[in-house]
Image (spheres, helix red, strand yellow):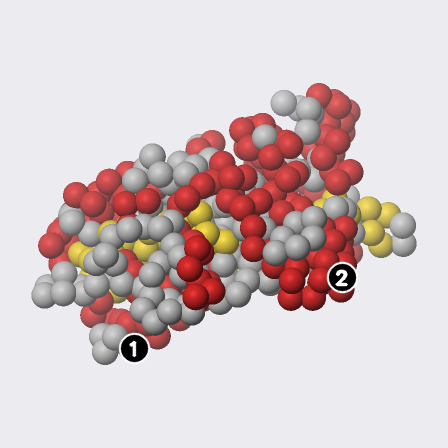
């Protein structure tokens, strides 16, 4: 690698995925394309999304409620378009995928199915400082069960002076909790540091202790390689508005291992959309779930949200997830290289990368802990048309995503940081 603009431009010319950028609407200011590094927050809009939504609207206009069964794409079967590409992205069988609700709602629903405190097996292991919605989910769900979150939750934090959580600490805590452990519910990729966890090892350890294991994949789905079925994960949930580009407030999704689909002992909160399809409209008393992850659905889904999700999933399928992952890895490695160069030139520590450097321990996101000029750098990036985000007390997070970001943008970002820090 070298730090010249020419090198970045060469990487873009060599990039087999470069044409995919054309399929997205890049934000502009006065006709100039901005550098959007916030695909970890809200992915950009695919150009085809409006057309897919419009098709649903037209069908609604033409057939009204009959659109569930009539038209080019009857809504009753729209879900089928989504499961195969999503199964490919998260490493599941299509029957293990359900597209429904939103992330926090789905976490609560999965708690109903997979957290059964009994006897002394009551503890839940989770990350310290998990994303706030997960914390509030735990707090309120446990209170609803009449339990004290402070007693039930075991939070694992980075060691003193470290930023990321050691796998050994997680595995050791799981083993030490042993027969008191009911559930491990962990974030697959930490939203603050960008650390990817060894989900296979965590699942294995949880099962060995006799507990269930699930993951919040908000920052992992569409970003890093996942093999949920082969890892034997019990359940996982994610949102679709980040790397999956399904739009603001997009419909979320969940994975539920097939061994639970027809388990008569599994608890769930049900609604009519999870009822066996062949006889749903017989409107009978007594809940009979669909024998797949779809059996966890409650309410009539929105085909408009499905359509937005489908638009993006088709782009993923065309690009190929392995190629996307490889480009994502190269983008973040290149960003680390350029930021390291800045640090090497400074006489005192300026920025500290808190994202792991080992390839499989990070996705697209790079988090920089600013030791100097943090706010100044962040504000200047905004003025330079670079979308990044700020997390208190002094972390700047950026994500260069493989579907629409370019190596030249990474170079321009690092160049802006360098200019602000060295005032050149
Ligand atoms: C790790 C994580 N969990 C949960 C959420 C909340 O998701 P939602 O608002 O879609 O329920 C987010 C949102 O960014 C998140 O990053």
Please name whichever residue, 80 or 111, is drawn nearer the observer in this view of the structure.
80
Please name whichever residue, 404 or 108, is drawn nearer the observer in this view of the structure.
108
- Picture layout, residue 4 above or below residue 219: above
Tag 1 secondary structure: helix
The crowd level at tag 2 (other Cα within 10 Å; few <14, some 14-19, many 20+) is few
Q: Nearer the viewer, mark 2 or mark 1?
A: 2
The C terminus - image quarter: top right
Observer able to see residue 147: yes
Q: Position of residue 341 (x, y in %)?
A: 61, 33
Q: Residue at image x 74%, y 54%? A: 55
Q: Going from the N terminus, do you reach mark 2 or mark 1 first?
A: 2
Q: Position of residue 330 (x, y in %)?
A: 58, 29
Q: Quadrant of residue 115?
A: bottom left
Tag 2 secondary structure: helix
Is residue 325 left or right of 419 when viewed as pictured? left
Q: Quadrant of residue 383?
A: bottom right
Is residue 348 left or right of 73 when viewed as pictured? left
- Mark 2 → mark 1, Cα distance in angstroms: 45 Å
The tally of labels here is 2
Question: Residue under circle 2?
Answer: 62
Q: Position of residue 138 (x, y in %)?
A: 34, 68
Q: Residue at image x 42%, y 59%? A: 279
Question: Residue under circle 1?
Answer: 144
Numbered label attached to residue 112? none
Q: Residue at image x 74%, y 46%? A: 48
């Amino acid at each position: 690698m070298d730090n010249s603009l020419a090198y970045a431009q060469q990487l873009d010319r060599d990039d087999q995925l470069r044409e995919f950028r054309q399929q997205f609407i890049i934000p502009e200011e006065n006709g100039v394309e901005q550098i959007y590094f916030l695909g970890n927050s809200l992915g950009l809009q695919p150009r085809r999304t409006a057309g897919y939504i419009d098709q649903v609207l037209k069908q609604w206009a033409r057939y009204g409620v009959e659109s569930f069964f009539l038209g080019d794409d009857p809504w009753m079967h729209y879900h089928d378009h989504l499961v195969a590409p999503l199964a490919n992205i998260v490493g599941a069988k299509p029957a293990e995928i359900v597209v429904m609700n939103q992330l926090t709602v789905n976490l609560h629903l999965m708690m109903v199915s997979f957290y059964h405190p009994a006897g002394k097996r009551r503890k839940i292991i989770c990350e310290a400082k998990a994303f706030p919605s997960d914390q509030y989910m735990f707090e309120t769900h446990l209170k609803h069960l009449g339990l004290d979150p402070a007693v039930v939750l075991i939070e694992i934090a980075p060691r003193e002076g470290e930023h990321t959580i050691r796998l050994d600490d997680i595995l050791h805590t799981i083993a030490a909790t042993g027969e008191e452990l009911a559930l491990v519910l962990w974030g697959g990729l930490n939203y603050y540091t960008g650390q990817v966890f060894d989900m296979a090892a965590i699942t294995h350890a949880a099962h060995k202790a006799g507990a269930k294991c699930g993951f919040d994949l908000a920052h992992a789905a569409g970003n890093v390689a996942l093999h949920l079925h082969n890892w034997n994960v019990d359940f996982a949930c994610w949102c679709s508005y980040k790397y999956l580009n399904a739009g603001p407030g997009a419909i979320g999704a969940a994975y539920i291992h097939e061994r639970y689909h027809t388990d008569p002992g599994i608890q769930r909160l049900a609604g009519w959309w999870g009822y066996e399809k062949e006889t749903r409209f017989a409107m009978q008393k007594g809940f009979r779930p669909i024998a797949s992850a779809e059996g966890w659905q409650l309410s009539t889904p929105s085909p408009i949200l499905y359509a937005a999700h489908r638009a993006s999933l088709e782009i993923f399928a065309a690009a190929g997830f392995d190629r996307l992952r490889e480009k994502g890895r190269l983008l973040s490695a290149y960003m680390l290289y350029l930021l390291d160069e800045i640090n090497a030139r400074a006489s005192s520590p300026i920025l500290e990368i808190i994202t792991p450097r080992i390839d499989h321990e990070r996705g697209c996101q790079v988090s920089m802990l600013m030791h100097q000029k943090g706010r100044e750098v962040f504000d200047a990036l905004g003025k330079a048309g670079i979308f990044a985000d700020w997390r208190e007390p002094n972390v700047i997070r950026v994500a260069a995503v493989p579907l629409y970001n370019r190596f030249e943008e990474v170079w321009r970002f690092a160049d802006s940081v360098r200019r602000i820090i060295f005032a050149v």
